[in-house]
Image (cartoon, rainbow, N blue to C red):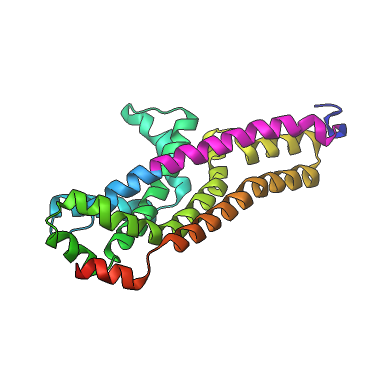
Amino acid sequence: MPGTEDQSVADWIPRLLEGLQLTVLLTLGGFAVALVVGLVIAVMRLNPKLYVLYIPSTIFVEIFRGTPLLLQLFFAYFALPSIGISFSPLVAGILGLGFNTGAYLSEIFRGSVLSVDKGQWEATEALGLSWGSSMRYAILPQAFRIALPPTGNYAVSLFKDSALAATVSVSELLFTGQMIGAETFQYMQVYAVIALMYLAVSYPTSVALRRLERRIDTTRPGRKRRKALVDA
């Protein structure tokens, strides 16, 4: 476009902000899907003896961890329509990101639950709590503390990985920046502003997660108190 190379930063910042909004939407939607998928798959994989749940959930995890995220996005947007399943670019991006991250989160959640001290399980059995009540009131709160740091890291990573959604026609932040760069040839300025925008979202998120972790640590009961609950 003639003359566009003379545009100032203020001229194309609004377009980048629109791309940032889509990036945030992709991240929030994808992470919501990932949490649901991760929890469901983690529960299905808690007991290897329940083959009807363990085998399909294990296959799911291996497929989504063993293939590239880019391929999964292509499959969701380009391949599924051949069997009559079509998604908009945004929905395909959210599902692709969500299912991929969910496969990793499922292992974090499962490992966190299994790492809870065995005495806690025995204490819930002694109190006559059902499996669901044991998970809700005793196991999951402790597992949450263990799972929070790696889960937070995956949330930040998902925000950055959302740039791959550009390959399925989602005009997120990086894709918008590439278009502006091609129009203005101001690649240095454009990509510098994009980097600052990513940092403006990811850094405060990381700080908030660290504060949440410290707050949870300060409210965690001491070893003697936990031991007393187990002995009770």
What residue do we see at 33% from left, 55% from top?
141
* 223, 54: nearer the viewer: 223
Q: Residue at x 33, y 45 (%)?
A: 37
For residue 165, say whether it is visible: yes
Relative side of 80 to 56, left or right: right
Percent of width and height locating residue 135:
24, 53
- Can residue 66 be seen in this snapshot? no
Q: Which residues are magenta?
A: 7-33
Q: Position of residue 25 (x, y in %)?
A: 53, 35
Which quarter of the rendering shows the C terminus?
bottom left
Instruction: Tell me the quadrant of the picture where the N terminus can be found.
Output: top right
Q: Is residue 89 above or below residue 28?
A: above
Q: Is residue 9 magenta?
A: yes
User: Is 56 within the magenta?
Assistant: no
- In this rendered view, identify the residue nearer to me: 72 or 45: 45
Q: Position of residue 150 (x, y in %)?
A: 45, 59
